[in-house]
Amino acid sequence: MKPIPWSQAKDSELEKLRGVCLDIDETLSTKGKLTAGAFAALWELKKKGYLVVPVTGRPAGWCDHIARFWPVDAVIGENGAFVFYLQNGVRRRLDTPGLEIDSRQKLAALGKKILEHFPHAKWASDQNYRECDLAIDICEDVKPWSSAQVDQLLDLCQGEGAHAKLSSIHVNAWFGDYDKLKGLKNWLSVGGSGAVDDLLFIGDSPNDEPLFSAFHKSVGVANLSRYLDRMKSTPRWITLGESGAGFVEMAARLKKLI
């Protein structure tokens, strides 16, 4: 079903929300930068009392920083592999059931196979800070891959028994039975507060599809439109603004409700 404009969301549907879960790349950020407006909007949501939880494909190294320095309650990283959060000032970690603790050999074999089929492939610049997945750069620091090449890469990874998801900048591949939604639910059941029905999710790409499917209240920033034809589950609403501007648009509406 095609998303309807965020401006058409009713206050009665939003006033009982307890928190916001968000993707980072090209949802909160804009062309690789975290704008002052988007970061301020994140702080305002936290100050208003909302639970704030990024759910990202970014690596463990980034997530450690985010958990410590951003106005968040937790961060789910590497497409659901784990959650980092602070408890009494100490950074804690909770792994998601289904995580393969040591899949390095499988990932190395997959990486070799990828380079055999795509000699031009480059790992994401943050690959050295990852613990559980392989990230192939499709446009962040390289010439953008064509849609056909991206589909071939996804098919190759899945054919080798890996999970593979497309984000706005990478294709992420991993071994283990988890995704962004399972990572979030694990934290909510063990260390979080509330349920998915109490939360809103905002994202921008196909790797957010498990969350769009599960959340009754979900929002896509406008740049999600380019991926709608390859998605089975889409958000309920979509913003007028793209990327960080879309996040600011969403947050501005929520701030008025409290």
Image: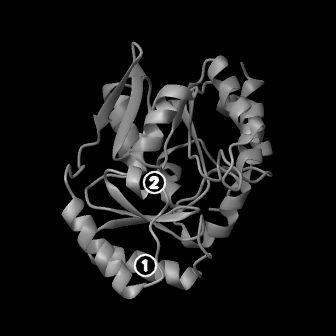
Residue 256 lies in what quarter of the image?
A: top right
Is disc 2 placed on a helix, strand or loop?
helix
Q: Which quadrant: the C terminus? A: top right
**Left or right of 183, for residue 243:** right
Say what amino acid the circle numbered 1 marks.
Answer: Leu
The disc, 1 or 2, on the residue closer to the chain's N-terminal end is 1
**Residue for point 37% across, 36% down:** 83
Query: Closer to the camera, 107 or 233?
Result: 107
**Left or right of 250, for residue 78:** left
- The tag on residue 39 is none
- The tag on residue 153 is 1
Q: Residues within 10 Å of mark 1 (few under 14, many from 20)?
A: many
Q: Is residue 161 visible?
A: no
Q: What's the CA distance linking mark 1 and mark 2?
A: 20 Å
Query: Closer to the camera, 90 or 197?
Result: 90
- The tag on residue 210 is 2
Above or below, comparing residue 66 to residue 98 in the picture:
above
**Left or right of 91, for residue 150:** right
Above or below, comparing residue 240 to residue 175 in the picture:
above
Q: Position of residue 158 (x, y in %)?
A: 33, 74
Give the total of numbered labels: 2
Above or below, comparing residue 211 to residue 206 in the picture:
above
Q: Residues within 10 Å of mark 2 (few under 14, many from 20)?
A: some
**Residue for point 55% across, 29% down:** 52
**Which marked residue is nearer to the observer: mark 1 or mark 2?**
1
Residue 156 lies in what quarter of the image?
A: bottom left
